[in-house]
Image (cartoon, coloured by chain):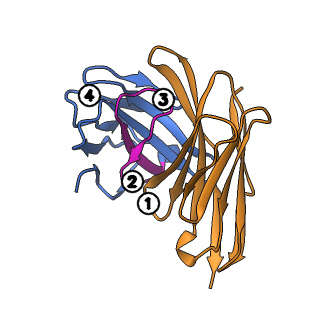
């Protein structure tokens, strides 16, 4: 059975701390891994990763994929209260043609305290 | 502002009633999706449509139906609501429907079935 596991489920840090969120997966026909940030409502896209070892960066956020060990990490440096959110990891599976699936992890709830 | 519009924002519904959740996008995306999000279970795909006129079943389709008469609209219908359908429902879209491409989400509909 395909699965995506995120850890920790929740995390409380103080402003300025650096955090690492984890996403491990066991799937067949891996295509890509995506990270989303969900504040109060709609998830918003952060990164898409398809190749091992290539770091994606956006400001204080960065992410990297390890396709050998089947995991990804999302790093946030110098955290701010605005980083408080649920971070979702999703893995895309591709069967061929237009057939595939996107499996979401349960998310990591990050709370950044002033 | 371009994006996905969902309506209503929230709804309380008596069990056994019929309900249609509306979703409209103005990005001319081919693919649209309906997810439900439940505490501890993450986002789960209900139905999807890769192009106008076609639909498919996701992970949890029972009790729900969809139609895709045109590119922009993708309504989700609960024919006879049950309490287990209490959830937050998100509509999403993507450019082509190729597995793993970036999803754009609506703001969600909070549905409570009593």
User: Can residue A2 be found in the magenta stretch?
Assistant: no
The residue carrying mark 3 is: B62
Label 3 or label 4, whichever lies nearer to me, is 4
Q: Determine whether the residue tagged by mark 1 lies in a helix, strand or loop.
A: loop
Asked if marks 3 and 4 touch (Cβ < 8 Å), the reply is no
**Chain B colour in the picture:** blue
Q: Give the CA separation, mark 4 to mark 1.
A: 24 Å
How many numbered marks have been drawn onto this rendered protein structure?
A: 4
N-terminal of the two: label 3 or label 4?
A: 3
Q: Residue at x 40, y 32 (%)?
A: B64
Mark 2 belongs to which subunit? Answer: B
**As displayed, is residue B9 above or below residue B27?**
below
- For the record, the magenta segment spans B86-114
* Residue A41 numbered tag: 1
Q: Residue at x 44, y 60 (%)?
A: A41
Asked if marks 2 and 1 touch (Cβ < 8 Å), the reply is yes
Residue B32 falls left or right of residue A3: left
User: Can residue B108 be found in the magenta stretch?
Assistant: yes
* Residue A96 numbered tag: none
> Residue B109: percent from the left, percent from the top?
38, 53
Q: Residue at x 72, y 33 (%)?
A: A67
* Residue B68 numbered tag: 4
Front-lying residue, B85 or A29: A29
Label 3 crowding class (10 Å Cα cut-off): few <14, some 14-19, many 20+? few
| Camera sees residue A38 | yes
Q: Give the CA separation, mark 4 to mark 2.
A: 19 Å
Mark 1 belongs to which subunit? Answer: A
The quarter of the displayed image where residue A77 is located: bottom right
Discs 4 and 2 lie in a common subunit: yes
* Residue B108 numbered tag: 2
For the C terminus of chain A, give its image quadrant: bottom right
Front-lying residue, B96 or B15: B96
């Amino acid at each position: 059975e395909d699965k995506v596991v995120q850890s920790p489920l929740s995390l409380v840090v103080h402003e300025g701390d650096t955090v690492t969120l984890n996403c491990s997966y066991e799937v067949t026909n891996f295509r890509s891994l995506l990270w989303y940030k969900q504040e109060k409502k709609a998830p918003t896209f952060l990164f898409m990763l398809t190749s091992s070892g290539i770091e994606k960066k956006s400001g204080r956020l960065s992410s990297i994929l390890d396709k050998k060990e089947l995991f990804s990490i999302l790093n946030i440096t110098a955290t701010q209260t605005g980083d408080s959110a649920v971070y979702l990891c999703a893995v895309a599976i591709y069967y061929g043609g237009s057939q595939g699936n996107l499996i979401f992890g349960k998310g990591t709830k990050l709370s950044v305290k002033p | 502002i371009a994006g996905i519009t969902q309506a209503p924002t929230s709804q309380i519904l008596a069990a056994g009633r019929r309900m249609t959740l509306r979703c409209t996008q103005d990005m001319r995306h081919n693919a649209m999706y309906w997810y439900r999000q439940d505490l501890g279970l993450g986002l789960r795909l209900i139905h999807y449509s890769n192009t106008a006129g076609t639909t498919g079943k996701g992970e949890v389709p029972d009790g729900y139906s969809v139609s895709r008469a045109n590119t922009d609209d993708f309504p989700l219908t609960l024919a006879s609501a049950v309490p287990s359908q209490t959830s937050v429902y998100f509509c999403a879209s993507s450019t082509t429907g190729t597995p793993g491409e970036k999803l754009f989400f609506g703001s969600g509909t909070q549905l409570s079935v009593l």
